[in-house]
Amino acid sequence: MDSPPGGFNFTESEMSFTPNIQAFCCHYTSQQSLAEGAESLKADGMPENVTLNRLVCGGKLKEITLLKAFEEGADAVFFVGCPVDACHNKKGSERAAKRVLAVQKSLQELGLGAERAEMFHCARGFHLEFVEAAQLMHKRISALGPAFDGGSK
Amino acid sequence: MIIAERKPVAEILAMVKDAKKILVLACRGCVSVCSAGGEREAEILASLIRIGLKKEGKEAQVSCDSLVRQCDKEFIDSIDQFKGTYDAIVSTACGVGVNFIANLRPQDTVYPALNTSFMGGSAEQGIWSEQCAGCGDCILHLTGGLCPVVRCAKSLMNGPCGGSVNGRCEIHADVECIWQAIHDRMIRIGQSEGLDRIAPIRDWSTTSHGGPRKIVREDLTI
């Protein structure tokens, strides 16, 4: 089997695997993206298997919310918040990063792999980085495989 | 308050490997304040157990609830409300709570979710430090309110030891020399004459080395 672009060596099961990725983002990093609508986001390259969940602020992100996503079938989660030094609510983005870190530690402990949770910082409004974060996670988790069936050990 | 931290999830999963109905039971006392075993942490732990079991391909019912405290008989009695919902309790209380459940619920299986660490306080958000050893013979009135029993690495009664440098402990450089702090404070509050006192050899029989301690208050017993 030929190796796909990007240097990943996919098995046959991985080739057919479409990861369930739950994205969480604050109101400010997501507002323009959501305003554009699903079709425009898709045109920008947003993977269709990435589900957006909007929070009012990164400060409202709870560890349990990310863990519940895994219970409900997610293969990965990530949060997109404001830049650390430019959070609309001062500390929300920093707090979100702490929650993501806690989940990463737990996933590592459970043998699922810390890389199934990630924190991204994006400037307010629409930026390609928002879509690129989703693409990066899609690529990463497609290579890792399902969380609960032959995934990262 | 009692300070604790959660055990590694793998250790907890190993405890409950044969359980089919697991109750993660939070305590709304000290461990809730130090963010180790309150309702929020118990909910997280229950989720981690479910995820861990899912990864191992096992199935179990994992529920989550809380008691006001787990160190009083009347609150332990309220476990009755969960009857039939568990065959193992994972307590996120301190060791006292786990012992109380084991004492008072002889038929129940109970496991500790936390490592009970020490008696201390919150130095700043997310950081706790030990402040009291519970030695049973308090001398804080002689040391300016600062405890050499637990805050001196050598538990010296006549300090400092001579090894501290610039007010830092020679054993733990990130810890202040409490005897330096005691001297500074006694002078500051006008009790420097107390520093001339030589403490006699201490009677350690009030500490925990002689087995479990008990206090009986006859004015309160019924």
Image: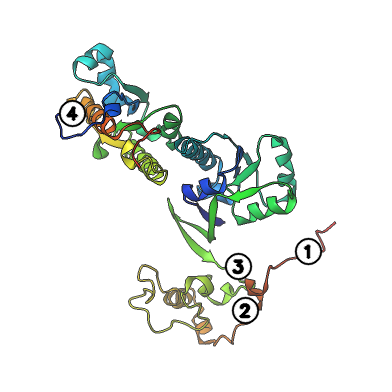
Sequence order check, earlier mark of 2 and 1: 2
Query: Does label 3 lie on the same chain as label 2?
Result: yes
What's the CA distance linking mark 3 and mark 4? 67 Å
Chain for disc number 3: B
* Residue on which disc 1 sits: B217
Q: Which residue type does callout 4 highlight? A: Met
Chain for disc number 2: B
* Residue on which disc 4 sits: A1
**Vertical order, B129 against A129 (above or below):** below
Local crowd size for mark 1, using a 10 Å CA cut-off: few (<14), some (14–19), many (≥20): few
Quadrant location of the C terminus of chain A in the rendered image = top left
Residue at image location 26% in from the left, 35% down from the top: A120
* Residue on which disc 2 sits: B204
**Is the C-beta separation of discs 2 and 3 under 8 Å?**
no
Query: Does label 1 lie on the same chain as label 3?
Result: yes
Residue at image location 18% in from the left, 28% down from the top: A1
Q: Residue furthest right?
A: B222
Q: Tell me if residue A88 can be seen.
A: no
